[in-house]
Amino acid sequence: MICQNCKGNGYIRVSWEAEKSIEQCKVCNSQGETKESLHYHQSWDDGAGSPTIYYGPPLDVEGDEGFKNYKIYPIESNINNS
Ligand SMILES: [Zn+2]
């Protein structure tokens, strides 16, 4: 599954005023792909003004109008630390 955070690039171009920089993608650890065996926090707007939050395998949102402002978040690496 292509990482929707970096669109498969493994990095993100960040523009801040005149400055441009490149950040490594933390969602896929610069791999460009999300793993369907892993669970990610994801959120989007369903188009009716209600934000939707989902935790599970990465969704295939490519070209799907039902997923507005779709975001996928990096996996928390310290969940099972205790
Ligand atoms: Zn990525």
Image (cartoon, helix red, strand yellow):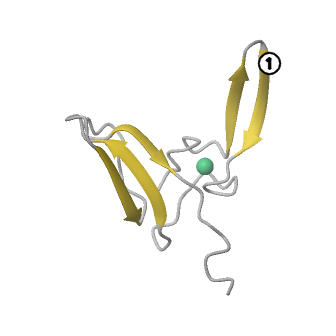
Residue 40 placed where, x, y %? 49, 63
Note whether 75 is above or below 65 in the view shown: below
Q: Residues within 10 Å of mark 1 (few under 14, many from 20)?
A: few
Q: Residue at x 53, y 59 (%)?
A: 34
Name the residue rendered at 62%, 66% in the picture: 76
Spot occupied by residue 1 in the image (x, y as percentages of width and height): 46, 56
Q: Disc count in the image? A: 1
Residue ID for mark 1: 19
User: What x and y, as percent, mark residue 39?
Assistant: 47, 69
Report whether 48 appears left or right of 4.
left
Does mark 1's beta carbon lie closer than 8 Å to ligand 1? no
Q: Position of residue 42 (x, y in %)?
A: 43, 54
Q: Quadrant of residue 54?
A: bottom left
51 with respect to 27 (left or right):
left
Does residue 67 sit above or below 3 in this rendering?
A: above
Per the image, label 1 sits on a secondary structure element best described as strand
